[in-house]
Amino acid sequence: MKLYVILVTWQLLYAGLASAVEPISTSIAVGMAAALTGFLASYPNLFYHFHECCRPEWISFNDTHLDLALNKKLFGQHVASRVVLKTVTGYMNNPNPKKPLVLSLHGWTGTGKNFVSQLIAESIYHEGMQSGFVHLFTATAHFPHQKHLEMYKEQLQMWVKGNVTKCPRSMFIFDEMDKMQAGLIDSIKPYLDYYENLDGVSYRKAIFIFLSNAGGEKIAEVALDFWNQGRDREEIQLKDLEMAVTLSVFNNKQSGFWHASLIDKNLVDVYVPFLPLELKHVVQCGVAEMESRGKQADRDVVERMAQDMNYFPKDARLFATQGCKVISSRLDYYT
Ligand SMILES: *[C@@H]1O[C@H](CO)[C@@H](O)[C@H](O)[C@H]1NC(C)=O
Ligand SMILES: *[C@@H]1O[C@H](CO)[C@@H](O)[C@H](O)[C@H]1NC(C)=O
């Protein structure tokens, strides 16, 4: 500010002597520029408050946030919720991880796989899924043509490498893994491994999340077994489901994922199983959806909507075929 005042004073003096108008406006501009530069120089971090960048102001893990979100917003997934919280918290609190975090989420559509990746993103990036450091790939949108596999592989490698170079704490979500071509994920396998660095880039701070329906049926079988034995759903533990998931993942030969040797090499840190949802969970989703729209939740309406949905097995009507996926559009119809 001082510089600005001195400049202007001097310039006014000069202007008075020379009676020139033009230099005054120029000098004011110069003075203001100098002042602004001085101001920014004394607050070097100011810029970062307005523009997202790869710094702790924008990227910092909040375990309370993740814990609360999983407990309050995710319904019917006691196993997934616990596993995700434990794994993500453990990894994020480790200052020197030996490899990137690789999660593989499994289960039927509408059980909350996408939602959980969104919650993880929100607990790490201030901008959540809108963050420039969170990358979502879907088979049908990003890698649709079989004949372009070689190009896709190169592109994907370049993207992952480029983005991790720019910001080590980058997150990559691969949706519809079942539809990914064989070999595509193989191309980024080295990045998931235990290397200190590859061509000078370390991937150890990166997070990879794979979403797939593979294993959904086997998981449902386990849940149904528990129900048939009169046992509580909440008694189901990770170990009861792990076998179901890994077996069906191994045996699912058409899906691109499993040709990849991710499994042989134990590059996936944890397989997260998502249970099929029951009517009461669908109701919970409906109530949450109405509340998120700022409305008073009408339980009768939500119950009616949930009752009208499809459930399996046909006789017992135990699990919602589409989970919570179509709730949003269904509610429009019922309200
Ligand atoms: C972490 O999340 C909790 C719950 O959302 C919030 O109350 C708290 O302020 C957050 N902490 C930081 C440091 O942002
Ligand atoms: C980062 O990934 C996106 C795709 O999500 C891609 O378009 C972009 O080119 C990548 N950036 C770099 C620097 O490679």
Image (cartoon, rainbow, N blue to C red):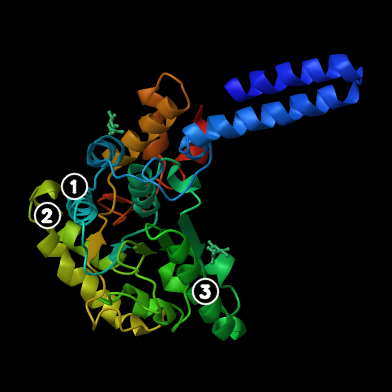
On screen, residue 287 above or below 149: above
Q: Nearer the viewer, residue 231 or 92?
A: 92
Q: Mark 2 points at which residue?
A: 236
Q: What element carries label 2?
A: loop
Left or right? Give the position of 14 relative to 216. Answer: right
Residue 18's spot in the image, x, y percent? 90, 20
> Where, by quadrant of the figure, is residue 218 drawn?
bottom left
Residue 281's spot in the image, x, y percent? 29, 40
Q: Does the residue labelled 3 lie within 8 Å of ligand 2?
A: yes
Q: Residues within 10 Å of mark 3 (few under 14, many from 20)?
A: few
Residue 35, can we see it? yes
User: In whole angstroms, how far apart are the C-alphas of marks 2 and 1?
Assistant: 9 Å
Q: Nearer the viewer, residue 313 or 275?
A: 275
Disc 3 marks which amino acid? Met
Left or right? Give the position of 4 relative to 335. Answer: right
On screen, residue 89 above or below 127: below
User: In whole angstroms, how far apart are the C-alphas of marks 2 and 3?
Assistant: 41 Å
